[in-house]
């Protein structure tokens, strides 16, 4: 007694299933995706579509340097927190004073 298997429908089914999976993956990758809207902490109404090759907006570098100098020897975390919050020079100084008072207390 011999058993014979017809491999042609099995191989064909595997190829069709693989092709369907490949087509589904390609369709998923090609779908339109909504871009995330970024909001600038200092100027929320400013356009946020600046590419990585464009220079920073006017005054941005000076603002970062000003906040960093106002914070003095503050920890990197507190300087970054003030920059993320869009703090003014006075707010940055107040945060530094509060940090020093908490350390001495």
Image (cartoon, rainbow, N blue to C red):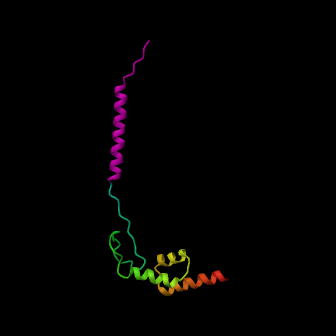
Residue 87 in picture, x, y percent from top left: 48, 82
Q: Residue at x 39, y 77 (%)?
A: 44
Vertical position of residue 16 compared to residue 100: above or below = above
Image quarter of residue 50: bottom left
| Residue 10 in the figure: left or right of residue 77 | left
Q: Is the magenta region chiefly helix, strand or loop?
A: helix
Image point 61% across, 83% down: which residue?
Answer: 100
In the rendered structure, the answer to whether residue 93 lies left or right of residue 7 reads right
Q: Please report the bounds of the magenta region as a residue range.
A: 1-30
Q: Which residue appears at 39% of the width and 80% of the height? A: 60
Name the quarter where the C terminus is drawn.
Answer: bottom right
Q: Is residue 51 above or below residue 95?
A: above
Q: Is residue 4 magenta?
A: yes
Q: x%, y% of residue 101?
A: 63, 84
In the rendered image, the residue lying farthest to the bottom is: 90
Query: Percent from the top left, x then y, of residue 18?
Result: 36, 39
Vertical order, 92 against 4 (above or below): below
Q: Is residue 88 magenta?
A: no
| Residue 31 at x, y percent in the picture | 33, 54
Looking at the picture, tell me which residue is in the foreground, 93 or 45: 93
Placement of the N terminus among the 4 image quadrants: top left
Total residue callouts: 0
Q: Residue furthest top?
A: 1
Residue occupying image coordinates x 50% and y 87%: 90
Q: Is residue 98 left or right of residue 25?
A: right
Along the viewing direction, whichever of 66 and 98 lies nearer the viewer: 66
């Amino acid at each position: 007694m011999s058993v014979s298997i017809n491999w042609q429908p099995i191989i064909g089914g595997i190829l069709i299933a693989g092709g369907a999976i490949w087509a589904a993956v390609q369709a998923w990758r090609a779908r339109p995706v909504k871009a995330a809207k970024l909001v600038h902490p200092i100027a929320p109404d400013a356009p946020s579509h600046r590419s990585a090759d464009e220079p920073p907006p006017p005054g941005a570098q000076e603002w970062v340097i000003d906040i960093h100098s106002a914070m003095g020897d503050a920890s990197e975390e507190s300087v970054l927190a003030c920059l993320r919050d869009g703090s003014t020079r006075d707010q940055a100084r107040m945060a530094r004073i509060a940090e020093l008072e908490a350390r001495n207390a």
